[in-house]
Amino acid sequence: MEIYYRKARWLGFIFIIPAFWLSLSVTGYSSISIKGSEAIAAYAVIGLCFLIALQCFMGSTRFYFDNKAKAGIQVRKHFYGEKIVYFPYSNITGITILCYRRVDTGITRYCVGISESAKIFGQNAVKFIELRSFGGTEDDRSNAREFAKQIGSYTKLSLTDNSDIIRAEAGPSDHA
């Protein structure tokens, strides 16, 4: 059961445009001429922009559940290779629905994810890995529950609905 398959190819164009413009400037084909020590910095920026654009064009992230492997599998593809992360069913404590409210804006959202048992600083803990986020209306809450039920029926993992407990989610203004 595939949960998501994300690609960011559109983002590559955002990095190609400044790299192309700087390339024209360094070679003297634009109204702004870059020479001397500025050219070294321009080449560094061009290289960085092309590297990020390459990652955007060739990279993707996919998450799916495989009942044969008894695991949730995340595949991260990059231009330099791929990384596969397994979340075995034996480590997953269940499918969980959580409710978050932003502290700064008051916007509510419902999240569906897997809860995984883990050791953090030598202590037993439960780690939440978000799979999909929904808006904050009652319809969104129903959609989140339906999505969690679909995953639960496919994987036979238990379902924990904590959507009635509102958790605070820090916004950018809370990190000052």
Image (cartoon, helix red, strand yellow):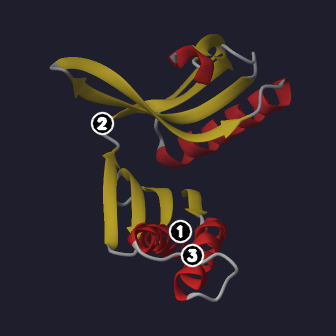
Amino acid at dot 2: Asn
Q: SS class of the residue under badge 3?
A: helix
Q: Earlier in the sequence, mark 1 or mark 3?
A: 3
Going by the numbered disc 1, the residue's amino acid type is Cys
Quick check: can you spot residue 65? yes
> Who's the residue at 62% across and 31% down the image?
111
The disc placed on residue 176 is none
Mark 3 vs mark 2, CA separation in Å: 49 Å
| Residue at 48% over, 46% down | 155
Q: Nearer the viewer, mark 1 or mark 3?
A: 3
The residue under the point 75% across, 21% down is 107
Residue 143 coordinates in the image, percent (x, y): 76, 37
> Quick one: 66 or 20, which is closer to the camera?
20
Query: Of marks 1 and 2, which one's residue comes earlier in the chain?
Result: 1
* Residue denoted by label 2: 91
Numbered disc in front, either 3 or 2:
3
Please name the amino acid that badge 3 sits on. Answer: Leu
Q: Residues under labels 1 and 3: Cα distance?
A: 19 Å
Residue identified by numbered label 3:
22
Circle 1 SS class: helix
x, y percentage for residue 158?
Answer: 48, 30
Q: Image point 70% across, 27% down: which residue?
A: 109
Q: Quadrant of the N terminus?
A: bottom right
> Is 157 left, or right, of 164 in this rendering?
left
Residue topped by disc 1: 56
